[in-house]
Amino acid sequence: MTPIALPWYRYPMLWFVISGPALVVVAALATCFIAFRFGDPPLASHAESAKTPEAPAMAARNHAATPKR
């Protein structure tokens, strides 16, 4: 006697396998919504911050503090 084949959607393990990637997609969409809706405003550009008199000293300090690659 041969077992009766069930339709694909009647296997519980299939839904377990599909639910993982589906939850990741939902979480990614929720993260995108939160990022675009409640994102931080952009910082001032580098050109605006370079107008201060101590800008060259700050650039040298930041360059010296950068770790070597």
Image: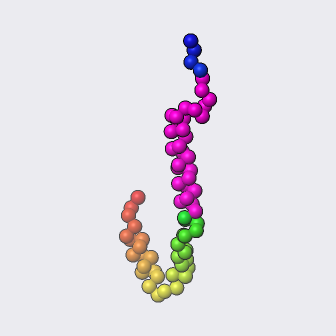
Q: How is the image coloured?
A: rainbow
- Name, please, the residue furthest toward the right: 7
* Residue closer to the observer: 50 or 9: 9
* Residue closer to the observer: 20 or 47: 20
Residue at image x 46%, y 80%? 56
* Residue closer to the observer: 38 or 16: 16
Residue at image x 42%, y 81%? 57
Residue 61 coordinates in the image, percent (x, y): 39, 75
- Name, please, the residue furthest toward the bottom: 53
Residue 26 coordinates in the image, percent (x, y): 56, 53
Label tally: 0
Residue at image x 54%, y 70%? 39
Q: Quadrant of the N terminus?
A: top right
Is 10 covered by the magenta stretch?
Answer: yes
Residue 43, placed above or below residue 14: below
Residue 4, placed above or below residue 26: above
Left or right: residue 69 compared with residue 48: left
Residue 62, placed above or below residue 68: below
Residue at image x 58%, y 68%? 37
Residue 43 coordinates in the image, percent (x, y): 53, 76
The region drawn magenta spans 5-33
Residue 15 coordinates in the image, percent (x, y): 54, 38
Is 16 covered by the magenta stretch?
Answer: yes
Could you tell me what secondary structure mostly forms the magenta stretch? helix
Residue 64, placed above or below residue 11: below
Q: Quadrant of the C terminus?
A: bottom left
